[in-house]
Image (cartoon, grey):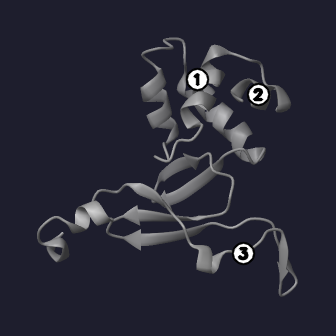
Amino acid sequence: MAKNTLKKLGLKLTPQRLAILNLLEGNTKHPSAEDIYNKLKPQYPSLSLATVYNTLEVLVKAGEVHEIRIKAGKRCFDPNPIPHGHFLCRICESVFDLDIKPLEIQTPCSIKGYLLENYMIYFYGICPECQEGDNIKDR
C-alpha cells in the first residue's frame, strides 16, 4: 500500500519514505514528525528530519494524512482519513481517537451556504487510565 501511495503522489520510492508510510499505516498514536524521525533514525541513519516533514506535508496536502494541532506548539499526524474527534488527556498528554457518531456529519455538505469538505473536532479532559489514579482534581 505504501508503494502505491508514493507512486500516486509522484514521489520517489525511497526506503525512508516507505518506512514513514509503513509507520503511519494503522497508527493510532498520532505521532509528531519528531516521533517518527526518532523511531526510524536507528534503522535509517541517512534519514533527515526534513525528509520526514516534507513527506508528511505531501501526505497532508493529498489528504492521505491529517495534521492535528490539538497540543499547543506540536503538530501530530493521523493516517485515518475518516472525520472523527480527537481527545487530549490533560494529565498524560496522550491523544486518542474519539468515536463521535452522534455528531457525525457527512462530507462534503453545505451548511448555511458554506461548503464543508472536512472537519476536525477536539476534546480535552482526562483519559480512563489517568482517571484510575489518585487525586485527579489536584493534578
Q: Position of residue 60 (x, y in %)?
A: 70, 45
Q: Distance between the Cα atoms at labels 3 and 2?
A: 30 Å
Of tags 1 and 3, the one toward the viewer is: 3
Closer to the chain start, of discs 3 and 2, is 2
87 vs 67: above or below: below
Residues marked 1 and 3 touching at CB (< 8 Å):
no
The quarter of the picture where the N terminus appears is top right
Closer to the chain start, of discs 1 and 2, is 2
Residues marked 1 and 2 touching at CB (< 8 Å):
no
> Label 2 is placed on what type of residue?
Leu
Q: Position of residue 20 (x, y in %)?
A: 59, 28
Q: Distance between the Cα atoms at labels 1 and 3?
A: 33 Å
Residues marked 3 and 2 touching at CB (< 8 Å):
no
12 vs 10: above or below: above
Q: Position of residue 7 (x, y in %)?
A: 82, 25
Residue reaching furthest left? 134
> Label 1 is placed on what type of residue?
Ala
> Label 3 is placed on what type of residue?
Ile
Question: Which quadrant would residue 139 be assigned to in this image?
Answer: bottom left
Task: Give the label on residue 6, or none.
Answer: 2
What residue would you read off at disc 1? 19
Residue nearer the viewer, 81 or 102: 102
- Residue at the image point whose x is 12% and y is 72% from the top: 135
Question: Which quadrant would residue 131 be assigned to in this image?
Answer: bottom left
- Residue at the image point whose x is 52% and y is 37% from the top: 33
Task: Give the label on residue 105, or none.
Answer: 3
Secondary structure type for disc 3: loop
